[in-house]
Image (cartoon, rainbow, N blue to C red):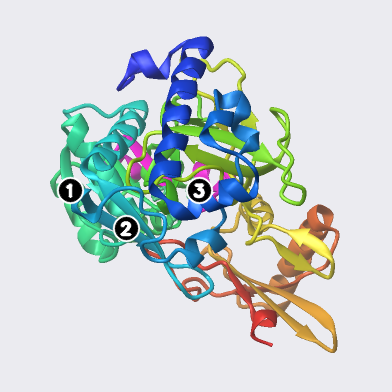
Amino acid sequence: MERYWNQEIECMSREDMKKLQDERLVAQVKHVWDNVPYYRQKMEEKGVTPDDIKSTDDLYKLPFLSKADLRDCYPYGLLAKPLSECVRIHSTSGTTGKRVVAFYTQNDVDLWNECCARAITAAGGTKDDVVQVCYGYGLFTGGAGLDGGSHKVGCLTLPMSSGNTERQIQFMQDLKSTILCCTPSYAAYIGEAYKEMGYKPEDNCLKAGIFGAEPWTEEMRKEIEKSLGIKAYDIYGLTETSGPGVSFECSEQTGMHINEDHFIAEIIDPDTGEVLPEGEKGELVFTSITKEAFPLLRYRTRDICVLSRKKCSCGRTLVKMAKPMGRSDDMLIIRGVNVFPSQIETVLIAQGYPPNYQIEIDRVNNTDTFDIYVEMTAEQFSDTVKDVQKKEAELVGAIKTILGINPKVHLVSPKTIARSEGKAVRVIDKRKLV
Ligand code: DLL
């Protein structure tokens, strides 16, 4: 039977949810207008005042907010509450210098915990569970978010943070952990180490994993589920909108329900900014309608995905977002072709390779070079050069079919590509250094 943390909200009728969102949006717009001069100026520049926003139907009138705005306002420029009412910060590294710093009031922390409690409950968690949190603790939101949700549900919480994989496995066995929370790449690594230590999937008490913070494929989900004997659930979020728990997967495992009582989602055309109809692929934009200290209106996430309001078998009525296939700023353009690392991952796993790979791009004589280093499993490993060359040629063919361009594939020995305890580094783009 499907469990809900907050059935009233999670299964609310569309009309009631819209009404709730309408009320909260109107109040939120007034809150930022009154308290954040930067927002007021952006709205004035677009000729919008709080009086123009009467419901979610007026959302499109508001200006977008981007990472560049966050950078301009670093560190306190978007704060909507006095510092005396803020109790926490979290932060994420930007690719270009300044970090993003997000602020929380106690109420913000409580609501964030509520969102994560919904995710843990949807993965089957109750107060009888032992939740091992091996997302990083600290400025990263993963550890604190799932820790807060786990406390709220009343689970026994193991605040492991990431790293020290042998100790993770020892605790997992000794304390009989039932739910594992970490990045999918770390889960894959734990699964690999688990096998190497001589354990079989049935030797642990785990029933579920809650994995997110980076793109991962359906193929990788199957790998992790098999290696640890669990059901693997996706969870999504970003520091700017509090952290994990903006959306979470249910038993259907076909996308993540967005906590719409806190976040309004839109999909836009990343080039024109035009709002796209349900079902079309584009950039995800969030408006946080309950956050007090750091409320973002129409924040452009750069994540590319699709929204769906198809009826879900779990009974939740919250809109679902597909697994983001990558960020528009992670998308590689190689020899003029758009490439997402997740497309390559899908091919690799389908061909029986482990999800340990690295893509290296460079520019030589004005032409892009495109190298993929792929680790073989111990079973695939072969000393015969001919054997390896044959396998490499097969992979080149499979990737060419998907992308339309030829990579150079290098099969490497087991354990030669660095493992990640947090978000995996999949791409080394040397062209940026020029
Ligand atoms: O990664 C928050 C988080 C922690 C989410 C733990 C889930 C679990 P940031 O470090 O600010 O926050 O990175 C946010 O990571 O815009 C996406 O590009 C990516 N991301 C997060 N979750 C997923 C996911 C955390 N489930 C950025 N699938 C986001 C794909 C994800 N990408």
Q: Is residue 16 above or below residue 149?
A: above
Q: Which residues are magenta?
A: 201-222
Q: Position of residue 371 (x, y in %)?
A: 70, 75
What residue sits 71% from the left and 49% below the top?
270
What residue sits 55% from the left and 32% below the top?
255
Q: Which label number is shown at residue 90?
A: 2
Is 89 situated left or right of 417 in this image? Answer: left
Q: Position of residue 399 (x, y in %)?
A: 76, 59
3D distance between C-alphas at marks 1 and 2: 20 Å
Front disc: 1 or 3: 3
Mark closer to the chain start, 1 or 3:
3
Q: Is residue 150 visible?
A: yes
Inspect the magenta stretch and tell me whether residue 212 lies in it: yes
Q: Which label number is shown at residue 40?
A: 3
Location of mark 1 (residue): 158
Task: Give the residue type at disc 3.
Answer: Arg
Question: Between residues 171 and 100, which one lies in front from this camera angle?
Answer: 100
Residue contact at pointers 1 and 3, CB within 8 angstroms: no
